Image: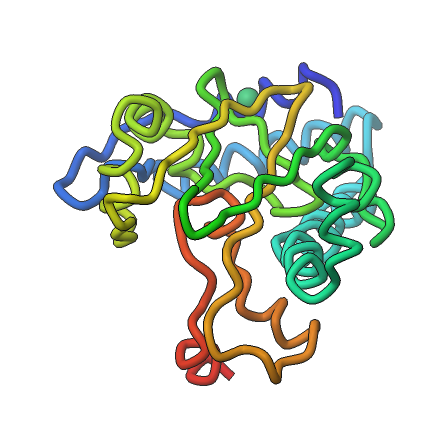
């Protein structure tokens, strides 16, 4: 994906919405966006630049072939397979490619392993760099100026905003992602999950826990979600 396309996607992120518990959300009227997209698509087709089928294929790729279910497979494998975990630690990009995931903003990935004493989270302070193949399209809050600024200066407050109370003795590390370097947090494996298969464990891994702003589902939450 070229830098130009990336910048164009970023251009959608106008930030408003400073409601009390809503610092990271952006509100753009969907009808306005939809109208613009429809007009743009019609124009591209009319001028023979693309076809409706080609656009459908692209949309299906984003809907079906990219997303946090891929990152979740990487994390679950790292939880159950110590040798894989070691390879992921040594060369994230290569270990992720073992599962068939490469390209689309996933060229240079470093895995960040949470421990009992250290918690990792990441941000793109410049714009919205994100490992699309592993996590899908970045959420609106990730692109918002309040998140990008506050996570650097007050990471614990950001975690609290997300309902994540990190114990005071756990050290927080904030990593700044870029076009050249992407990150993937491997959170701690939730308790009471020894009997779960790798596939079941992947079901506990949320997008936000791979950014570091959330936790994996607990055993109880996972059971309730099935
Ligand atoms: Fe960026």
In this picture the colour scheme is rainbow
Residue 198, percent across and down?
70, 72
The answer to whether residue 39 is left or right of residue 28 is: right
Above or below residue 59? Residue 225 is below
User: Between 35 and 205, which is closer to the camera in this rendering?
Assistant: 205
Quadrant field for ligand 1: top right
Q: Residue at x 50, y 47 (%)?
A: 114
User: In this figure, what is the number of numbered marks?
Assistant: 0
Q: Residue at x 66, y 40 (%)?
A: 132
Residue 24, percent across and down?
30, 37
The picture quadrant where one finds residue 3 is top right
User: Between 88 and 123, which is closer to the camera in this rendering?
Assistant: 88
Quarter of the image with the N terminus in it? top right
Residue 56, percent across and down?
75, 49
The picture quadrant where one finds residue 5 is top right
Above or below residue 126? Residue 161 is below
Residue 95, percent across and down?
81, 45
Query: Looking at the image, which residue sits at the far left?
Result: 20
The answer to whether residue 180 is left or right of residue 130 is: right
Q: Residue at x 43, y 29 (%)?
A: 174
Above or below residue 30? Residue 218 is below
The answer to whether residue 14 is left or right of residue 189 is: left
The answer to whether residue 46 is left or right of residue 12 is: right
User: Between 129 and 177, which is closer to the camera in this rendering?
Assistant: 177
């Amino acid at each position: 994906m070229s830098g130009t396309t990336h910048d164009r996607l970023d251009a959608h992120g106008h930030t408003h919405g400073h409601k009390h518990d809503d610092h990271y959300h952006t509100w753009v009227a969907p009808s306005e966006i939809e109208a613009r997209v429809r007009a743009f698509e019609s124009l591209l087709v009319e001028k023979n630049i693309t076809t409706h089928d080609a656009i459908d294929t692209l949309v299906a790729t984003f809907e079906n072939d990219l997303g946090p279910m891929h990152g979740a497979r990487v994390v679950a494998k790292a939880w159950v397979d110590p040798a894989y975990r070691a390879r992921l630690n040594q060369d994230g990009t290569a270990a992720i490619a073992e599962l068939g995931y490469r390209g689309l903003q996933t060229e240079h990935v470093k895995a960040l392993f949470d421990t009992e004493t250290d918690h990792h989270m990441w941000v793109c302070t410049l714009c919205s760099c994100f490992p699309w193949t592993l996590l899908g399209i970045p959420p609106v809050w990730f692109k918002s100026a309040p998140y990008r600024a506050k996570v650097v200066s007050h990471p614990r407050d950001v975690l609290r905003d997300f309902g994540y109370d990190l114990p005071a003795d756990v050290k927080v590390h904030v990593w700044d992602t870029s076009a050249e370097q992407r990150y993937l947090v491997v959170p701690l494996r939730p308790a009471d999950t020894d009997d779960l298969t790798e596939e079941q464990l992947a079901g506990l891994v949320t997008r936000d826990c791979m950014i570091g702003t959330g936790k994996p589902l607990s055993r109880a939450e996972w059971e309730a979600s099935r």
